[in-house]
Image (cartoon, helix red, strand yellow):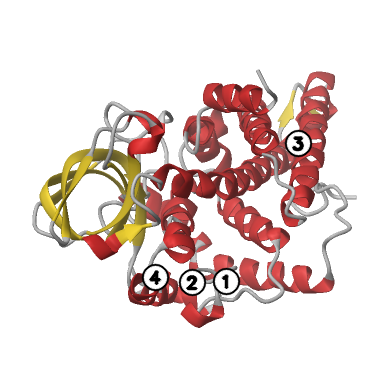
Amino acid sequence: MALDFDSARLHNSHLTAEHDAFRTQLRRFFEREVVPFAEQWDEEGAIPAELWPKAAAVGILGLGYPEQFGGTSEGIDIWHSNILNEELARVAVGGIGATLMVHGIGLPPVINFASDAIKQQVAPAVLAGTKRISLAITEPGAGSDVAQLTTTARLEGDHYVVNGSKTYITGGMNADWFTTAVRTGGEGSRGVSTLLIPADAEGVSRTALDKKQGWWCSDTATLYFDNVLVPAGNLIGQENRGFSVIMNNFNSERLAMSAAMEAFSRVCLEDAVAWARERKTFGQRLADHQVIRHKVAEMKQRINATQAYLQKVCEAFQAGQENAGDIALLKVQCSQTMEFCAREAMQILGGIGYMRGNRVERIYREVRVNAIGGGSEEIMRDLAARQYGL
């Protein structure tokens, strides 16, 4: 049997004919609207704005969101989400998925905790692809340790006055709203709130972060808030209870990243095997050299183990029995597998793998952002240890 992206997957008994049809629909869309242009967009450092409404039209942006806001939620499960992240990974330009789907971390707090008026104002436009929303948590002095953030929001009358800055904000340069973690109370997590800040509010400014190792076409920004007036009605959840709003988001984000990283690993395996069959050295195919065969075997071994872990954690998530510690360690497992497979694939491809314009080279550059974003490997291990009572 040929080793390709789909045959390299473990059997998943949860997948139905409907899931297969959904994958086919997505793959056709990406192969028509994204794959031919992905490398160019990455080199140019930007994605065309028309991709958002196109993605909305085929149900990508609204996947899993309430139908009252233009989403599709009936019959949607974690496996649909995983399929979407897998098909995006096949493109092997991580910045496309990161920016196109950034509402996946910016919008859920609004859907789950904001007032009905705010939901109606924001959600339909975002899911239609006509407006965008980003999540603004990380600061120059506070990353994974959210409880230490220093951006302040002081309530004066019917407005909050916001001062501070955020950085490494995916989608930040073109967002219309920022779901923003701010400090409204004392130190630590109990003083954190979440506000929806309009990007066009007076006192909001932003600068592009465009000198990145990977995710070149991802829109990344540093945000500045200088006495920004935000209506009190833009509070998401309760004042000084914003930490729980943020934490509620993390498990889904980390699962999405995990599914993508496992799929990136399979892309590396697929391209390495294809090259090993074609390339000849010393009168033999690369695939005929034992050292190459062992590299392929170990890549597949690690992918198998990661897929099994991913499937187990997703089953618990779908059953409403998610465990934050297990999800955190899954993310570590996936980033380590992605890193190993990217490295070994680069070794198999040799010089051609080092040249820009191939999937493995792009994935190799994007390993680190996956190992850091959404919670670094070190923070994930520590979170899991606390979950298990240490």
Residue that mark 1 sits on: 29
- Location of residue 349 by image quarter: top right
Task: Give the Cα separation between the discs numbered 1 and 3.
Answer: 27 Å
- The quadrant in which the C terminus is found is top right
Judging depth in this view, the residue of 88 and 12 nearest the camera is 12
What is the secondary structure assignment of the residue under circle 2? Answer: helix
Residue 175 makes an appearance in the image? no
Residue at 67 percent of width and 55 percent of height: 82
Question: Badge 1, how many Cα within 10 Å: few under 14, some, many 20+?
Answer: some
Residue 313 marker: none
How crowded pointer 2 is (Cα within 10 Å; few <14, some 14-19, many 20+) is rated as many
Q: Earlier in the sequence, mark 1 or mark 4?
A: 1
Q: Residues within 10 Å of mark 4 (few under 14, many from 20)?
A: many
Q: Amino acid at mark 1?
A: Phe
Is the C-beta separation of discs 2 and 1 under 8 Å? yes
**Distance of mark 4 from mark 3, alpha carbons?**
33 Å
In terms of sequence position, does the residue under pointer 2 or pointer 3 come before the other?
2
Image coordinates for residue 322, horizontal then vertical, percent: 70, 46
**Which amino acid type corresponds to the residue marked 4 in the rendered image?**
Val
Q: Nearer the viewer, mark 1 or mark 4?
A: 4
Image marks 2 and 3: residues in contact by CB distance under 8 Å: no
Q: Nearer the viewer, residue 234 or 249?
A: 234
Q: Amino acid at mark 3?
A: Thr
- According to the image, label 3 marks what residue? 306
Residue at (39, 70) in percent of width and height: 126
Measured along the vertical axis of the image, is residue 34 above or below residue 251?
Answer: below
